[in-house]
Image: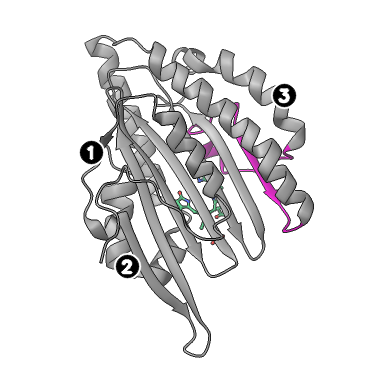
Amino acid sequence: MNLRNSSLDSFTIEDWRWQIFLNHTIRAFSKFDLKPCQFDGQFLEKEALSGSKSRPVSVVIRTWACSTDKLIKVRAACLKAGNSTSVFNLVAIPECNYEIPFFGADFVTLPSGHLIALDLQPMIQNERTHRNYFLDRLIPIYDQWKDEFPHGGDFPDEVKKFFSEGFIWTKLPLDDNSEKIIDNKLMLVFSQYLDLYIDLVIQAKKVGEFRVDKLIEGQKLYLEYRAQKDPARAMLTRFFGSKWTENYIHNVLFTST
Ligand code: DBV
């Protein structure tokens, strides 16, 4: 039985690490006229039992999502598995007739620690003109925070084009100090990136036809990359099976419809 009828309905997941980030996200986007996304109920929320027969672990995933005039889709995948795993994965996908980047956040708590990724990601890869639409405002925020979030390790060269120069990527151990960093510093930088993003959306003006084609092409490359390389695929498949997972990745998370 689904308790949520609309992708716009907010929700709480008990003891889920990233609840305040979801709440903040919903509040921030509420300044727009939001429309729900039409997903099948099984993608609005899904529960499963994992672990062994003697020690079952309950798993829940819920998706909050909306669209606006200038954003095809903003969706947050929110997962909790037992007491050790919490995920908040947020992506905003712009309409291709505006020069707006993607918003991307991947906040992941695992038994081995927290993984934090936060970025405004270019719609057109390898192009200075497009990056300059947002970098001059993103970099001053990034510079303020970069020393607080030591770099979490390098990426293969062929994927670097999908990130901006303001990419925050860090790993934190599971301890009290990390909890403080997440509640204070990460919350602050997240809200600064989100405020900037929302302002970029508000300011964005329609682009010409020639530009739309470039934006469509770049968006397609990005979404294909994210769907193909989704680091959550193995985990989601383990919890929910391969059919549900592939449908969720290709038709809900990383699609421009
Ligand atoms: N990542 C997603 C979605 C998730 C999700 C939709 C629904 O894109 C969760 C859930 N990310 C997730 C999980 C892991 C990671 C890891 C569960 C742990 C996988 C594991 O260890 O088993 C950032 N996320 C990662 C990693 C990176 C990112 C680099 C480590 C990958 C690895 O070690 O192989 N995700 C990546 C990224 C963005 C992003 C750069 C952009 C902001 O969203």
Numbered disc 2: secondary structure = helix
Return the mark for residue 242: 2
Q: Which residues are magenta?
A: 149-175
Which amino acid, by three-letter code, is at mark 2?
Answer: Ser
Q: Are there few (<14), some (14-19), or many (20+) residues within 10 Å of tag 3?
A: few
Q: Is residue 39 above or below residue 104?
A: below
**Residue at position x 48%, y 23% in the image:** 197
Alpha-carbon distance for marks 2 and 1?
22 Å
Instruction: Report x, y in % for residue 144.
Output: 72, 24
Alpha-carbon distance for marks 1 and 3?
36 Å
Q: Main secondary structure of the magenta part?
A: loop
Q: Quadrant of the C terminus?
A: top left
* Color scheme of the displayed model: one colour
For label 1, the residue is 257
Q: Is residue 49 above or below residue 160?
A: below
Q: Is residue 58 above or below residue 70?
A: below
For label 3, the residue is 144
Which amino acid, by three-letter code, is at mark 3?
Answer: Gln
Q: Are there few (<14), some (14-19), or many (20+) residues within 10 Å of tag 1?
A: few
Q: Is residue 172 left or right of residue 106?
A: right
Q: Are marks 2 and 3 in contact (CB under 8 Å)?
A: no
Query: Is residue 1 in view?
Result: yes
Q: Is residue 177 above or below residue 187?
A: below
Q: Are marks 1 and 3 in contact (CB under 8 Å)?
A: no
Which amino acid, by three-letter code, is at mark 1?
Answer: Thr
Q: Is residue 110 left or right of residue 90?
A: right
Residue 165, magenta (yes or no): yes
**Residue at position x 35%, y 24% in the image:** 32
Numbered disc 1: secondary structure = loop
